[in-house]
Amino acid sequence: MPNTSRGLAVGNALVTFATANLSGLGLVYCDWQKGMAPGPVYPIDPVSDCPRLELRLYVEEIDAAVARSTRTLLKFGWWYYRLQTPGQDHQKLLRTDLETIVNLFFGNFNPLQLELAGANFTRPAQTVIHDDLRHEFDDPTLRVSVGEILMEIACIGQA
């Protein structure tokens, strides 16, 4: 029988792994996204809420049983929020941070937490840099750069 809670288990493992391995970014928050907005959400207080990394589960596709096993494809999005500092090269800094996050999930990536959650294969699928989020009064010191990393994870288990 397929495990429809795989997305939650794998997502929790991703959050645990990212929290433990991305301390160099100085994240003030690394966890599941709290709301269901379709796009980036301006932080309540960008000065104290950034940088932050939020995980979203977009799709959990379960293939029909083949040879007594099922394949579940999970599609996640990591949303990264970074407070801008006037005068800095925001795009370059955002890109550097996104590459740090992507590099964590490349290569020989399959930490124990993900194996225990049933993940067999992980790959970053795409990185997107979104438009800046602006404060309602367009205060340049409160603008937030936003990037998203889409990733796919395959889980193969017993039918």
Image (tube, rainbow, N blue to C red):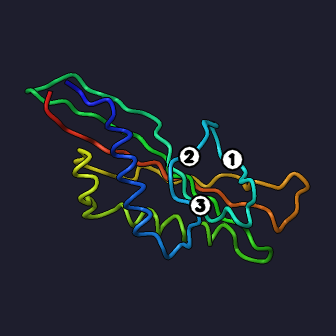
The answer to which quarter of the image holds residue 14 is bottom left
Residue neighbourhood size for the residue with mark 1, other residues' Cα within 10 Å, grouped as few (<14), some (14–19), many (≥20): some
N-term mark: 1 or 2: 2
Task: Estimate the x, y position of residue 135 in percent, counting from the top left.
Answer: 83, 55
Amino acid under disc 2: Gln
Q: Which mark is residue 41?
A: 1
Number of marks in the image?
3
User: Pointers 1 and 2 in contact (CB under 8 A)?
Assistant: yes
Q: Nearer the viewer, mark 1 or mark 2?
A: 2
Q: Is residue 76 above or below residue 148?
A: above
Mark 2 lies on residue: 33
User: Pointers 3 and 1 in contact (CB under 8 A)?
Assistant: no
Is residue 45 found left or right of 126 in the rendered image? right
Measured in 3D between alpha carbons, the distance from the residue under mark 1 to the one under mark 2, in whole angstroms, is 10 Å
Mark 3 lies on residue: 52
N-term mark: 2 or 3: 2
N-term mark: 3 or 1: 1
